[in-house]
Image: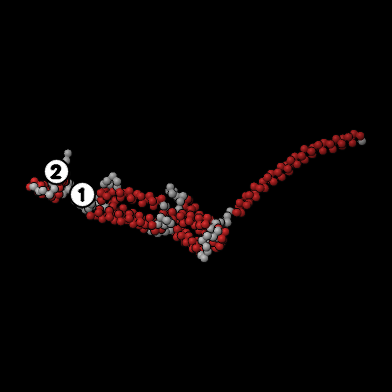
Amino acid sequence: MAPPWCLCRALLPALALALLGLAVAAGPRRTPALELAEELAEELWSAGLPGDLPELEPECRSLLAAFAEGSAALTDCLGRRARPVRLCQGCHGPYRHLLAQYGSIARAVGNSSESHNCAKSILTSDRLQIVVTLSEFFNETWEAANCANCLKNNSEGLSNSTEEFLDLFNKSLTCFEHNLQGQATDLSPNNYTEVCKNCNETYTKLNDLYNHLQKLNRQGGESAHSAHLCIDVEDAMNITRKLWSRTFNCSLPCSDTVPVIAVSSFILFLPIVFYLSSFLHSKQKKRILILPKRIQSNANLVNIQEKYS
């Protein structure tokens, strides 16, 4: 049961509001009772709210403000780089900063006399747990984007393979743009032959590098997203392939043409080999069956000749 002084403090705002309501309802006519009510209401309000809701300690308040600013900065970064997708390239700095701020909240301890933990006050003091929810959202988004595949081990910058890919990607787009300058926008697909011819080498290198990175990622990845490269690389490759195949109607020569032709030729010649071997085998059988008859006939002829001689 709560102590009496807590109950009294809990009733102070209600009494103050009731007295002020009476004063307002009475209108302009003022009586000694109403004046007394107003004075009593002012005294009650000056006494403060019941229990004086505990505020965050200065250290915890500054940590929460820093996390709020970091969340806003990361949200702004993700939103501005949503299309075309450039999340991993441009937002790894704000994401690392936000992780550090969340870690500071989880480790920090306040300086008040009660020594409340900032983690408990900020992270788990209510059912909604806004800070935890925001942190989980950013972590899940970053993991779904597979940005770790684009960055170095310490996440301080893009990996060498990613930089090489993006360099070829930019060269491919530059080549497309350069070969389209001075041409009408309503060209038919048959008029993009210059793009296909002049940009074939750059696009082939880009496509081969992407396939190589994808193969390496599938061999070494064990996570649920291991089948995917980072979203920046995937989106860049999808854009380039759509431009190459759909917009320009270009195509790459198949690198497996020789093996395909060899296998197809072998399959086509199989019936010929089968029938030829069957024919030779049956002919050999006939020779084996006929040969004893001829030997027997010659033997009988010799016996007859000897008999009559």
Q: In the image, what residue occupies the spot 81% across and 36% down?
A: 293
Give, as a three-letter code, the residue at label 2. Cys
Q: Going by the image, does 211 lie left or right of 40? A: right
Q: In the image, what residue occupies the spot 8% across and 47% down?
A: 31
Q: In the image, what residue occupies the spot 79% across and 38% down?
A: 290
Residue 65 image position (x, y, % from top left): 27, 55
- Report the residue that reaches farthest toward the bottom: 182
Crowd tier of the residue under label 1, counting other residues whose Cα lies within 10 Å: few below 14, some 14–19, many 20 or above: few
Quadrant housing the N terminus = top left
Residue 82 image position (x, y, % from top left): 40, 55
Location of mark 1 (residue):
54
Residue 8 disc label: 2
Near-viewer residue (160 or 297): 160
Q: CA distance from mark 2 to mark 1?
A: 19 Å
- Report the residue that reaches farthest toward the top: 307
Q: In the image, what residue occupies the spot 30% across and 54% down?
A: 68
Residue 125 image position (x, y, % from top left): 26, 46
Near-viewer residue (59 or 251): 251
Residue 14 disc label: none
Give, as a three-letter code, the residue at label 1. Pro
Element type at mark 2: helix
